[in-house]
Image (cartoon, grey):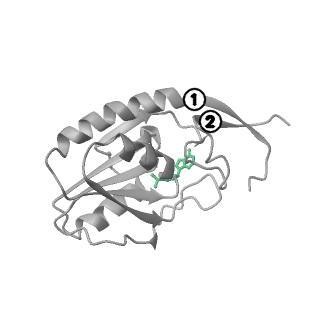
Amino acid sequence: MPTRPYVIDEMISAKAIAARIEDLCREIQTEFAGTDKLVVVGLLRGSFVFIADLVRELDLPIEVDFLEASSYGDGMESTREVRILKDLRGAIEGRDVLVVEDIVDTGHTLNHVTHLLESRLPARLKSIALLDKPSRREVDFKANWTGFEIPDEFVVGYGIDFAQRNRNLPYIGKVRFAEK
Ligand code: IMP
């Protein structure tokens, strides 16, 4: 639970997110056209709303799996050391894989996860992040598709939390601490 009072200012509306997902899905469908072995892998917990909307917009035969990597704990700073807390249920060797992430911030999480999954020899491995904060990058990583580039702000909503709260907001908002 957050310990300081804060307000949330809307940054990206639910409507804008839905429209962007439609565009992204057209590109993803072109990339994976004809495949019948695509596994869409959601990174828990932040991607759960995004992956739900994404897969319902994708007109492809897919399977869905989840992986959980450690990141922020309950704070606002990345721990940098990435650990796998929950691994995939299925094998991905020879499969096409699309990794779905909420935000690429320092880049450590997706960089680590994509290297790990590459070592399992998928036929093709691509990644998508709803949000990207390029100014925060510490490792050279870029997702194949990005929904929106945003400035260095702490955001919540649409699956993304602040100390586990606000995941259920339908839009992306930025956290602003109330004046004392
Ligand atoms: P990275 O490893 O620094 O790229 O961090 C990726 C993870 O940090 C994301 O999957 C989020 O869980 C978390 N994160 C990064 N920025 C924010 C934010 O603004 N709000 C909430 N979580 C964030």
Q: Secondary structure at mark 2?
A: strand
Residue found at x 19% / y 46%: 32
Q: At which x and y percent is residue 7?
A: 74, 36
Q: Residue at x 62, y 29 (%)?
A: 10
Instruction: State the residue at coordinates (25%, 52%).
Output: 61
Q: Which residue is mark 1?
A: 11
The quarter holding residue 124 reads bottom left
- Cβ at disc 2 under 8 Å from ligand 1: no
Label 1 crowd (10 A; few <14 / some 14-19 / many >=20): some
Name the amino acid type tagged 2: Lys
* Residue 51 visible in the picture: yes
Q: Horizontal and vertical percent for residue 85?
A: 48, 72
Front-most of 16 and 110?
16
- Residue 142 picture location, percent across and down: 32, 45
Quadrant location of the N terminus in the rendered image: bottom right
Residue drawn at x 46%, y 71% is 86
Sequence-wise, the earlier of marks 2 and 1 is: 1
Task: Say if 8 sits above or below 5 in the image.
Answer: above
Q: Which mark is drawn over residue 153?
A: none
Ligand 1 closer than 8 Å to label 1 CB? no
Figure label count? 2
Check contact, mark 2 vs mark 1: CB within 8 A: yes
Compared across the picture, whether 174 is left or right of 127 comes to: right
Which residue is labeled 2 in the image? Answer: 174
Most foreground residue, 127 or 77: 127
x and y percentages locating residue 23 in the rendered image: 32, 30
